Image (cartoon, rainbow, N blue to C red):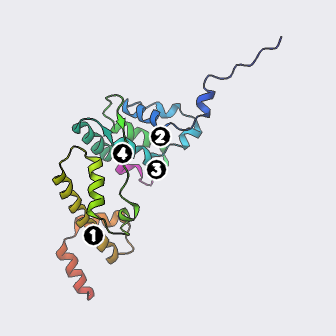
Amino acid sequence: MATKAKTPVNEKFEKQDFDLFEALNALDKKDYAWFDKLTEDQQRKFVPFMMTHWMSAIKGNSELQAYYVMNTEYTANKYLFNEYVQKHPKLQWLMLCAASPGLGKQFHQWIPHITQSVSKLKSAAKVKDIKEYYAKIYPNADSDSIQEVAEAFVVDQKRKMHLSELFPNLKIQDIETLNHLITDTEIEAYERERGN
């Protein structure tokens, strides 16, 4: 008598794509071993950039929201795309786990990015757009504070665009660093020396 061969218990899981929400739940629990449970195909579908974006924005009390944003940036985001770290997805997963406070499942939300042309210093930021962006990130902040932050962002972005025109061969990260190091007086002196 012929018997049916049993299908492996994990066959369904192996056929499944990478589940973003299951991953976020694992991060909320600080499940460092979760990444090892994935198939190789699922591990290849892990996109750290997407995970940081989803992980950093939660609904809840403002202190916890601030924690997620700041600790995701401090513990993971600023290192994830290092040329050596980005070759190791498991390390990236571990960094994201370390960023979580481990308080259990949270409601993560997608917040759209500032447009790529603004981020890459190709077009000027508009106060209205930046204000809408920050209002989504900080829904409990008062509108005067959001307005102030948006205006400061636009001024800073305009300065970075100017620096990128002066130094067209610098990468955006280098422009960011230069923006923090150099004063307006030094920029004006540099332009005078160049005859502008």
Which of the marked residues, 1 or 4, is nearer the chain's N terminus? Answer: 4
Residue 90: image tag: 2
Which of the marked residues, 2 or 4, is nearer the chain's N terminus? Answer: 4
Which of the marked residues, 4 or 3, is nearer the chain's N terminus? Answer: 4
- Percent across and percent down for residue 144 are 16, 54
The answer to whether the residue labelled 2 contacts the one labelled 3, judged by CB atoms less than 8 Å apart, is no
Residue extent of the magenta highlight: 76-86
Picture residue at 23% right of the left edge, 67% below the top: 155
The residue beneath circle 4 is: 76
Q: Dot 2, how many residues are within 10 Å of its Cα: few (below 14), some (14-19), or many (20+)?
A: some
Q: Dot 1, how many residues are within 10 Å of its Cα: few (below 14), some (14-19), or many (20+)?
A: some
- Percent across and percent down for residue 163 are 30, 73
Picture residue at 50% right of the left edge, 43% below the top: 46
Give the Cα separation between the discs numbered 2 and 1.
38 Å
Residue 158: image tag: 1
- Mark 3 element type: helix
In terms of depth relative to the viewer, which is nearer, 132 or 24?
132
Give the Cα separation between the discs numbered 1 and 4.
28 Å
Q: Is residue 156 above or below residue 35?
A: below
The answer to whether the residue labelled 4 contacts the one labelled 3, judged by CB atoms less than 8 Å apart, is no
Q: Is residue 61 above or below residue 116?
A: above
Q: Quadrant of the N terminus?
A: top right
Give the Cα separation between the discs numbered 1 and 3.
30 Å
- Mark 4 element type: helix
- Answer with the quarter of the image where residue 156 lies: bottom left
Mark nearest the camera among 2 and 1 is 1
Mark nearest the camera among 1 and 3 is 1
Residue type marked 1: Lys
- Percent across and percent down for residue 57 are 33, 42
Which of the marked residues, 2 or 1, is nearer the chain's N terminus? Answer: 2
